[in-house]
Every structure is written in C-alpha cells, then in structure tokens.
Amino acid sequence: MSSSLPVDPVFHLILETPERVPSPALPSRLRGLFRELAGADPQRPVEEIEDQIWTLWSSHEDRVAEETLAAAVEAIASGELQKAKPLLDHLVAKHPDWAEAWNKRATLAYIEKRDADSLLDIAQTLRLEPRHFGAISGFGNVCLRNGHLNEARAAFQIALAINPHMEELRDMLENLSPHNLMLH
C-alpha cells in the first residue's frame, strides 16, 4: 500500500542534507554539538548533548516567542491540540526563520493525522536546519504511516548519520529490513 501523499519534495531535501547549509540565524554552537553527537563514543552523555541541541533549537531572542513555544509544547503534551495550533500558527507567521516553530507545528499536524501539512512544515524546518534529526525522523514516520517504506528507511538512515544514538530508529530500521517484512 502506497499513498498519493507528495513525499518527493521533502525526500529530496533530506537526501541533500550533507550539502545543505543551516540558516545563519542558528547558533554557531550547534556545529560543535553536532560534531560531538556524531562521534561513536562521546566524552559526555549523549542525552546531555541532545538536550543542549534541543535547547538551542527551542531558544529565541524574543522571550515571548520562547514562552509561546513552551506553551504550545505543553498544550500538545497535555492533549490540548486545539490550543496548540493557533500558538504555532502565530509563531511561524511572526518568526518564519525559526526552524523549531515549524518543527513543532509539523509534530502537531502529524499527531492530528494531517500528514500533508506535516510534510510542508517538515520541509520548512529542513530548509532552515538540515541537520534536524527530529524532523527527518518525523518524515520517516509520516512515510511509514502512508506506505512509503523505502523513503522511511532512507530517512531513518540519514537521521542516524546525524545522530547515531537514536536507538528507537535502529529498531525501526531493523523492523523495516527486507528479511523482516512479510512480502506477498
């Protein structure tokens, strides 16, 4: 089963990840964190590195924007999805260069099973932050839900190239390997 969902434009962005340059608006500290994260055996806990990356992605010079993003994340976590959407819509309109606002709106759309909307926001996230392993794995999950198994596999592999410590993606890749799929 394969859907008619237009995954190709986002898939091409993901395939171009190694050549793409992150937005200059992103903190330069991210470069070192990604280098450290890519190591097979980082000198400090992986969770600490990941937390610093997520903190920098979620940071904004506008304190009200940061608070709005935090409120949207809390609304999503507590299942108040209708409360989160206008907050995220406002953030991407007011701060279109903030990758994490787009990513959180993509997450909300995924939860609400609005996969085409999720893909549009994942694409914008990746235009701004091509290293966004969360958005790339989110794309893989949209693909899985819609029967695009090859694209899902490729996305998970690329996300793991950026963050090789995402064990749940390794498990998903193993489950997607041809010898584990029942082909009829």
Image: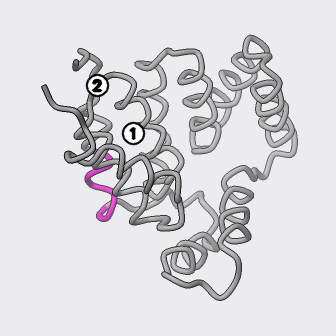
**Residue 88 position within the rendered picture, expressed as x and y whole percent measured from the top left:** 69, 26
**Residue 169 position within the rendered picture, expressed as x and y whole percent measured from the top left:** 46, 52
Magenta span: predominant SS is: helix
Q: Mark 1 or mark 2: name the one nearer the start of the chain.
A: 1
Question: In front here: 159 or 118?
Answer: 159
Dividing the picture into quarters, in which one does residue 7 lie?
A: top left
Residue type highlighted by circle 1: Gly
Q: Disc 1 vs disc 2: which is toward the camera?
A: 2
Residue type highlighted by circle 2: Gly
Mark 1 Cα-neighbour bin, 10 Å: few <14, some 14–19, many ≥20: many
Instruction: Name the residue beneath numbered marker 2.
Output: 147
In the rendered view, tell whether residue 86 sits above or below residue 141. Answer: above
In the rendered view, tell whether residue 42 sits above or below residue 97. Answer: below
Considering the image in quadrants, where does the C terminus appear? Answer: top left
Q: For the residue labelled by badge 1, is the local secondary structure a helix, a strand or a loop? A: helix
Asked which colour scheme the image uses, the reply is one colour
Decide whether residue 17 is among the magenta residues: yes
Locate residue 18 relative to residue 45 in the image: left or right: left
Residue 8 shows which numbered tag?
none
Q: Which residues are magenta?
A: 13-19
Decide whether residue 94 is among the magenta residues: no
In the rendered view, tell whether residue 9 sits above or below residue 100. Answer: above
**Residue 53 position within the rendered picture, expressed as x and y whole percent measured from the top left:** 66, 63
Q: For the residue labelled by badge 2, is the local secondary structure a helix, a strand or a loop? A: loop
Instruction: Name the residue beneath numbered marker 1.
Output: 140
Locate residue 125 relative to residue 73 in the image: left or right: left
Dividing the picture into quarters, in which one does residue 30 lie?
A: bottom right
> Residue placed farthest to the left in the image?
184
